[in-house]
Image (cartoon, rainbow, N blue to C red):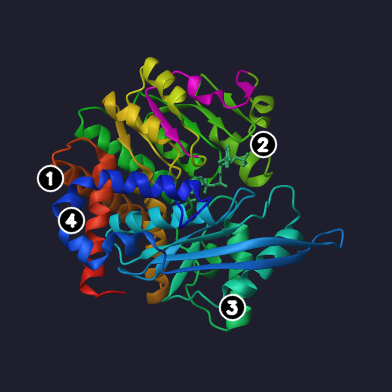
Amino acid sequence: VAKNPGEAEFHQAVKEVLDSLRLVVEANEEEYRKNGLLERLVEPERVISFRVPWVDDQGRVQVNRGFRVQFNSAIGPYKGGLRFHPSVNQGIIKFLGFEQCFKNSLTGLPIGGGKGGADFDPKGKSDREVMAFCQSFMTELNKYIGADTDVPAGDIGVGAREIGFLFGQYKRIRGVYEGVLTGKGLTYGGSLARTEATGYGLIYLLDEMLKQNGKELAGKTVVVSGSGNVAIYATQKATQLGAKVVALSDSNGWIYDANGINLDVVREIKEVRRGRIKEYADAVPSSEYHEGKGIWSVKCDIALPCATQNELNLDDVKTLVANGCFAVAEGANMPTTREATEYLLENKIMFAPGKAANAGGVATSALEMTQNSMRLSWTFEEVDKKLQEIMVGIFSKMADAAKRYGVEGNYVAGANIAGFEKVVMAMNAQGIV
Ligand code: NDP
């Protein structure tokens, strides 16, 4: 804490991971002390922070702060998204980068861990302003990334539009047409099914977790928080598999539709008009809109937090459990607070942590990198099939690791242990670096 002051989310993520690795660490304590393994693991290989000046539509100069944290390259080039949100700071990017190392390891694909972003708020900005920001951001970032070194992608506030502007500027400066970013548009090297991948992958993993625990998704009532990329495609796949999603949210409020969310309406609002979730209630009069953060008071069987970190706290999970919720799977990164996670585990609620449950996005990004290197494009069905296999594989890795260490059913420990094991083996093989 003294070494990294003010990085609350980073401390939280490190503590959560190290706590659940206690059994592994105790078994290898002498070795880890000698080779400084844990100290190296929590220290990013590189932290880059830079000024991003750009000119707004009034002709005024705005200055934001950009970051790229290249956390660990033991198993492949750094890989992880860029987040544009006013809350972004070094501690948040470090927490996300740290988690990304284990998540990427769990996918079984050759990708290291990284994350980046800026405290820029794309909300309410014109397309020209967003382009000006992205071009300035990439003018600095391009020095540190490349198809074989570091391959960023989208995250909160960074979707297809932003990735396009970033890619265009990279190509213009570096003069190479290469798979340096993932989440690209389909006309310039993107992969089919990448847009859907995180939400779909979440549901594939959830489905497998339910099956392995004698339950099924069909007929269940589901609450999904957020209404961005992850939330929309989680809703779509859950609905396709026979579940009923009854609530969605954004940072202002939440909607409830007892008939099941009409996703066409949501996509028109969010993807076409870039509007607010509140507008759903205008389009679907039988639904309700509520201001504030009360979405977890909606009675459901399954809860899927898909908005942001620390959005699901102890009071929320008490309400969920009292209402009969029996499974929680994290679409967002670290949406559940530590106390809430402990409460869910103590109450034997099936709980799939984000680093496993939302790994479908980065896994499909790695498939995009493969297609770019091979200079070909797979069909939607091919990518989707690989995604399903990867998610089932992740479930079995985390379930197996939990069993090996005597904490069967604790997927938080299982995911951390399974992700950690591969990173550590690769780090040890490469010497003290
Ligand atoms: P989007 O920007 O598409 O959507 C984010 C959603 O969450 C919006 O509805 C937004 O509402 C809401 N939200 C964001 N910040 C807050 C906040 N502080 N309080 C309440 N609501 C908030 O992002 P994504 O869907 O891509 O990402 C959502 C989560 O999933 C993040 O944690 C991200 O790291 C994680 N993730 C995403 C992946 C991807 O492939 N996209 C991959 C793996 C993880 P509003 O519009 O009001 O801000």
Q: Quadrant of residue 344?
A: top left
Q: Secondary structure at mark 1?
A: helix
Q: Nearer the viewer, residue 114 or 206?
A: 114
Q: CA distance from mark 4 to mark 3?
A: 47 Å
Q: Which residues are magenta?
A: 286-306
Q: Is residue 107 shown above or below 52?
A: above
Query: Considering only order in the chain, which callout, 4 or 1, is on the residue closer to the N terminus?
Result: 4
Query: Considering only order in the chain, which callout, 2 or 4, is on the residue closer to the N terminus?
Result: 4
Q: Which residue is disc 4 drawn over?
A: 29
- 409 within the magenta span: no
Q: Position of residue 376 (x, y in %)?
A: 41, 72
Question: If the image is split into quadrants, where does the C terminus sit?
Answer: bottom left
Q: Which residue is disc 3 drawn over?
A: 171
Q: Secondary structure at mark 3?
A: helix
Q: Quadrant of residue 430?
A: bottom left
Q: Which mark is residue 276?
A: 2
Q: Secondary structure at mark 2?
A: loop
Q: Quadrant of residue 301?
A: top left
Farthest residue to the front: give it. 2
Q: Position of residue 420 (x, y in %)?
A: 26, 56
Q: Nearer the viewer, residue 229 or 264?
A: 229
Q: Is residue 15 shown above or below 100?
A: above
